[in-house]
Image: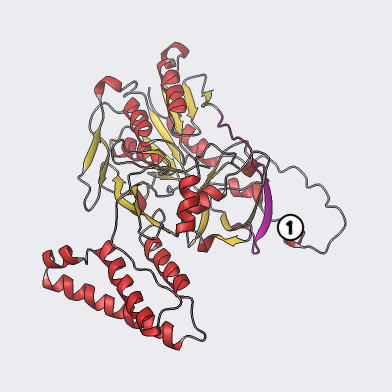
Amino acid sequence: MRRWEYHSAIGLRLTGRQLDAARQPDFGVLHRTMPKSLKISLLALSVVLVLGVFVGVNVHGVRAAGEEAQAGAYNQINVYGEVLQHIQSDYVEVPSIPLVTTGALRGLLESLDADSSYLTPADYKAYKDDKGGKAQVGIHVSKRYGYATIISVVPGSPAAAENLSDGDIIEAIGNQDTRDLPLAVIQFLLEGAPGSNLEIGVIRPRKAEPEKITLHRVIVSEPPVGDTLYENSSIVYLKPIEMDHEHVQEVESKLRAMNKEGSKKILLDLRDIAGGDMPEAIRLANFFISSGTITTLEGQKFAKQTFTADPAKAINTTAPLVVLVNRGTSGPAEVVAAAIQDDKRGQLVGEKTFGEGSLQKTFDLPDGGAIILSIAKYASPSGKQFEDAAVTPGTVVASNQDALFADTDDDSSTSTTKTEPKKAAPAPAPVPDDQLTKALDILKAKTA
């Protein structure tokens, strides 16, 4: 699925293709025909400049920093320089300096967070040429443990048909290892022309070996907001699929219609919601909260922004409210959940959320490459940054949906020697939704 990136002016927008670029210090251009000593010098210089970008060790930063900070930074530069010299002179074979530099820069960026990336000139050209709006397979991804990891799956999508779920690791896309790809590249490789095939290698928590899967890209259409009435219509259950304008508008309409239907309690299901707009998430949280902080955004050089509730936009601030969350609840949906929990407006039930929510900016580099750098992070009203702490519900209930995908015969999914046709697997028995059951029990016990 297309990833949403945040923009300093409006909080969040679709992708970062048009983010304002800013020039950064030259990393240097290393050429294979240079003498060995010059290569080492230039590579060491590139490390100095890279560190200058990320820890403030440039001409102006060094002058402004304290002596202790300067000494620590220069010590690290010396360590990097010595490592590079050993690689150049003692490695088993003559290394490719450009590849070494690319690997070092990618490792440097990804050590900060999953959303920060280094793009080579070729990567960046493809990134800028990608205009979006392509066919997809219905998954939201981030990076965890070095690999692309599925955050959530869109119901009814090709990925859902293959029983992919949050927590599954995409080891490879085609013949490319996702460990060697920046997140921005992974996201646009998942897209393509309608009807085209996407071959991925998936490691599931329930299987020991990677599984090769072929998905057909389609124009994914998110289902409308699901709504169900429980307990003699006294409880209205609302399930948006994405935190975009259309789905939030649907939630608003259904909340305003509650009184006409006789419903007096609300169950908001934010499980497996990873896409959307931050402004829309703030708007949805405001439906339930009439005052106080909804979220904040702040960075080292990014002045703190506080987003507060507008009483005029609140719709229902008194009805008993329970919110469902799980490990697929990410980004904008986490903002809604945390605001409701910290305001004590409602009770959270389910699992700890994924933990994501930051503002990125793209910086052009002189060689045609770029870095995507997180410059600010969103936090809950209590001050917990989502990327660091996620959101933990007050009532923890583990998901039992994994039982749907339990192992049957490991060999049948990985073997390439069997020629007999596979026997159709029996349809799995329905698995109870313990999280939903617990949430309904809590609401039933509340007085409207």
- Of residue 173 and residue 342, the one placed in the foreground of this image is 173
Report if residue 362 lies within the magenta region.
no
- By secondary structure, the bulk of the magenta-drawn segment is best described as loop
Check residue 206 for magenta coloring.
yes
Range covered by the magenta-colored residues: 203-223
Relative horizontal placement of residue 279, taking residue 161 as reference (left or right): left
x and y, in percent, of residue 444 in the image: 45, 28
Residue 381 drawn above or below residue 98: above
Secondary structure under the numbered disc 1 in the rendered image: helix
Q: Which residue is mark 1?
A: 413
Task: Please provide percent x and percent y for residue 142.
Answer: 47, 52
Q: What residue is rendered at 39% in x and 48% in y?
A: 356
The one nearer the camera, 381 or 435, is: 381
> Position of 374 compared to 271: left or right?
left
In the image shown, does 95 or 426 lie closer to the viewer? 95
Q: Indicate the position of residue 261 as horizontal and vertical percent values.
A: 47, 13
Q: Residue at x 51, y 86 (%)?
A: 92
